[in-house]
Image: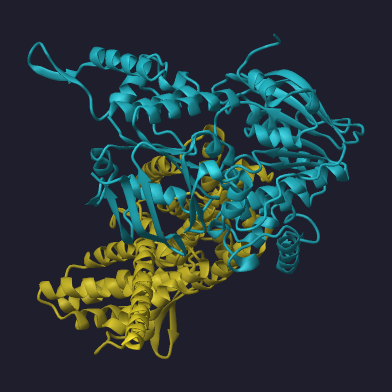
Chain colours: A cyan, B yellow
Amino acid sequence: MSEYIVEMCHITKRFPGIVANDDVTIRIRRGEVYALLGENGAGKSTLMSMLFGMYEPDRGDILINGRKVTFHSSTDAAAENIGMVHQHFKLVDNYTIAENIVLGTEPMKKLLGLFPSVDMKKANEEISELSKRYGLEVNPTDRIEDVPVSVRQRVEILKMLYRKAEIMIFDEPTAVLTPQEIDFLLSIIDSLRKDGKTIILITHKMEEIKRIADRCAILRRGKLIDVRPVADTSIQEMANMMVGRQVNFKQDKKAASFGETILSVNHMTVKNEHHFDVVKDVTFEVRKGEIFAIAGVSGNGQTEIADAIAGLMKISSGTVTLDGKDMTDTSIRVRAQSGISYIPEDRQGTGVVMDFTLRDNLALRKYYREPFSGNGILNFEMFKGYADKLIERYDIRSGEGAKTFVRSMSGGNQQKAIVGREIEEHAKLIIFVQPTRGLDIGAIENIHSHILAERDRGAAILLISLELDEIMKLADTIGVIYSGRILKIAPADEMSSEDVGRYMMGVKEA
Amino acid sequence: MKTKGHFLARRLNGRYASVWVSVLAILLTIITAGILLLIMGKNPFTAFYCFLQGCGLAPKTNYGGGSGMLSDLTDFLNYLAPMMLASLAFIVGFKAGLFNIGIAGQMLISGFAATVLVGYNKSIPAPAAKILVLLVGIAVGGLTGALVGFLKYKFNIHEVVSTIMINYIISYITGFFINNNYVDMLTRTSRVCSPESRLTLTGVVIGGVNCKVPIGIAIAVVMAFVVQFIFDRTCFGFELKAVGLNRKCARYIGVSVGRRIVMSMAFSGILAGLAGVTYYLGYTNTIIPKTLVSMGYDSISVALLGNSSPVGSIFAAIIVTIFQQGANYMSSMVGVAKEIASLITGILLLYASCGTYMKMMARGALQKELDRADDAKRAAFMAEEGGEEK
């Protein structure tokens, strides 16, 4: 048998306009944890999608156990005992955990000795046994829609185990987890390794690689830069190879000086479209020159807080006051003009019009006002000049400058465009929701420095992030949200990330 | 053939890709229709020439007394005017993300209202009557369109559903009134409107032939440029496009999305209303009860063929109208049922909607060419290296 369980030789994959993988060769040993490190767009996911049969390589070969294979679909890959936990889970929300796991390979029985039907009892038993064996506690009869993200991830892992996967691909598995949940996941990965499974970990977090991986392949712009044993590579080295230059981990953060209160939210309750309270009786305030960060696990009401303050969701009770003026019932545009800027979570779905040019997107806050338009007629010369100014000031990179369609820009540059557009309003309050999600280190540095610069200019900043590292790095004050309530508000230097993690899981004062 | 493939591939990736898609769609349609005609045992070249002759774009061999090429051409323009306006109506909705398939109904109700209110009132002098007809068309079309927008905004009723229903309602209500009050017992259609109110000047003699001069064509061309200007240059058009391309983002930047939906449907309805009065009080002078004109649907093909560009739709409307309007003459000369016109329009729509696929194929072809050049370069390089070794 070959020393390597997976070999991907001279793989090249192109998409319109970009080379996602350029002559990449990786060889993975049986029973190791092999990390793929790279920034967004470096080609990690594309490479693994080819191993999982979702794409076929333009050039190059894939060998499993030394044998050449061609995958036309993920079913072909599954037949070679390859499993994948996707970044966005692929589960049926209104099915039970067991139903999700057996879907496609259901154990069958004959009803009345005649009609074939799914043997759910057997499935439930098999799954609880499997979950006990690997320490992945789940209740097979719970519905997916009722269980939290970390459990959904366990279901995905169980799905691979149920299908007897030997090669397991994890795509950014820790992106949605709290620190405690990350510890748990890493211990699970470790026990899978002890069980003889081969693990491929796609990530851009060096700390995790350092803790769990044996070897690490670094990709940059589609090319394989190096493969290193993790034990003798420092985090700084990995980061430098990943970015292609010296990375500065420390951001200069000046001491904060708080001014008067800009935003005050009083006993705010927000209902979602199903008339269900998603934000419950939330009270906090943000001062001039302060970064107030809301930490929490995804889906606990933090984006709704932002939407409600910006006017996109109705407040069912309570008030929102900006600089002493009541904003509770005003329109979105009035709030924007009164000094609220908002960088929304869903940058492509909400933040930009993808099929507008960069020029038009940068003018979205300005187009209806002098001198960008007069008497309802747009002044495109102003548009162009303004766009060029922002492109330079915020280092927004694109194929054709101002006339590039935003759809063809990278996620990082789309975000720089939104951040630039919103900051240029010189608002009293700037709301950032997940400002660096999915961005590479360079873009993250850029956006973090803008957030700090705005704070130092004297803006009040409301930062909502799922990345605890980001919150710990930037926040002056931290509020932790759980199930729509803010459980704890404290100055950032009085809480450790473990403390915040505990509140994020709903644990109250000990 | 190979060079032609590359030529097309490059055009379909270039700056005017959408124009080339339309040109290609037209060419493919003509080829497909030609093959169909061949299968039927007809000469496709003769048939296509007959389409042009029927529209007054090519001379016929002989003409009846008092008519000539110019009278065919004005007939063609009479049909073209409402076609252009109807496709503009579709485009205005479409740009704002609304699929207005109620154009036929909006045309019918405006035409009916204008006929009853102005067309049957013989006492109004010509210029005033014509202006009134246009105003009634604008008002009734606009209100009908606004109703659709309002239903969407207030009750979240999808415009495709509501326009289909409203089409039926309009068709039966107007049919009921025509049959009860306004029917011409001989033709079983509505009584003709007064010549004073009609938007087509009949019996005009130019160069010795009788012509029907359409006022509507001027209105249609002006409106095409007005619509183009609104979408290219105004805040209103900018907001409509934002609503059409990304409703969530439009809301986020503070556009009142609901109001914009109502306004764009009203604007769409206004153009459909103008199409209605130029059709029922121009191209014809009577209304067939309980019948929606196929133009309401053909206008969708025209809009898509014109890449939903207002000025582009002028050219697209000309192409489609040539087939629609030339079909009668072609049918009598070549002996193919005139329904082939609808068939050709259908094929045209099919090819026009394959535009994205065509662009994708072209991109693939270009990439392959680059690959081949790359391989050749590499092979040449290797050969050179090998040579040196020896």
Residue at the farthest left position = A114
Q: How many marks?
A: 0
Relative vertical location of residue B203 with respect to residue A106 in this rendering, above or below: below
The spot of residue A210 in percent (x, y) is 55, 38
* Viewer-closest of A407 and A82: A82
Pick the front one: A408 or B146: A408
Q: Residue at x 36, y 88 (%)?
A: B388
Q: On the rendered image, what quadrant is the C terminus of chain B found in?
A: bottom left
Residue that appears at 32% across and 88% down: B387
Q: Give the camera-side residue of B32 and A282.
A: A282
Residue farthest top in this picture: A510
Can the viewer see residue B83 in this picture? yes
B199 sits left or right of B79 in the view: right
Between residues A398 and B141, which one lies in front from this camera angle? Answer: A398
Horizontal relation, residue B128 to residue B102: left or right: right
Q: Residue at x 39, y 67 (%)?
A: B359
Indicate the position of residue A28 as horizontal and vertical percent values.
37, 45
Residue B65 in the image: state x and y as whole percent: 29, 86
In this orientation, does residue B75 appear? no
Q: Position of residue A77 (x, y in %)?
A: 27, 42
Rendered position, B270 above or below B302: above
Which quadrant of the figure contains the N terminus of chain B? Answer: bottom left
In the displayed structure, would residue A256 be above or below residue A149? Answer: below
